[in-house]
């Protein structure tokens, strides 16, 4: 039997200015859970993943930009469910400090 694990999203390395830090928290059944810490990412790389992704903004603020040119701003507590093949990127994160995300990468299909 596996013992329960506990942690805090507030714990973890803070990235350098302009960077992101990814930490895998769990993996099971084809799903993966990550803690993502961002500091002032501006027009990051485009993502177009083969799986759906659920993201929750925990702290800070950010905007997601989509291939059609639209953007959606997020504040703490806001979430998005991005379908597979949804081309997106982080347009910006809070310039005053760290932006913290919880991302769940779901199995394809």
Image (tube, rainbow, N blue to C red):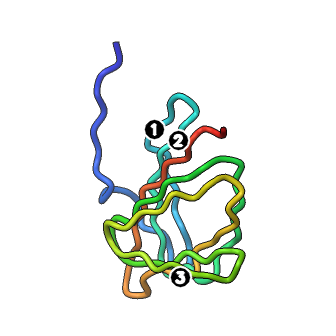
Q: CA distance from mark 2 to mark 1?
A: 6 Å
Residue 59, compared with residue 6, is above or below; it is below
The reply to whether the C-beta atoms of the residues labelled 2 and 1 are less than 8 Å apart is: yes
Earlier sequence position, callout 2 versus callout 1: 1
Residue 42 percent coordinates (x, y): 59, 83
Q: Which residue is mark 2?
A: 32
User: Residue at coordinates 58% horizontally, 33% vertically from top-left?
Assistant: 30
Camera-side residue of 44 and 105? 105
Report the side of 30 relative to 87 (left or right): left
The numbered dot on residue 26 is 1
The numbered dot on residue 92 is 3
Dot 2: element: strand
Q: CA distance from mark 1 to mark 3?
A: 26 Å
Earlier sequence position, callout 1 versus callout 3: 1
Q: Residue furthest bottom?
A: 95
User: Residue at coordinates 55% horizontally, 47% vertically from top-left?
Assistant: 105
Camera-side residue of 66 and 5? 66
Q: Tag 3: Cα neighbours inside 10 Å, few (<14), some, or many (≥20)? A: many
């Amino acid at each position: 039997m596996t013992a329960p694990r506990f942690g805090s999203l507030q714990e973890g390395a803070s990235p350098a200015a302009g960077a992101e830090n990814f930490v895998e928290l769990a993996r099971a059944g084809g799903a993966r859970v990550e803690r993502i810490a961002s500091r002032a990412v501006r027009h990051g790389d485009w993502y177009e993943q083969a799986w759906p992704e659920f993201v929750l903004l925990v702290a800070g603020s950010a905007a997601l930009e989509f291939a059609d040119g639209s953007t959606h701003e997020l504040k703490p507590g806001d979430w998005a469910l991005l379908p597979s093949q949804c081309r997106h990127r982080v347009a910006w994160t809070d310039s005053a400090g760290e932006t913290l995300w919880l991302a769940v990468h779901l199995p394809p299909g």
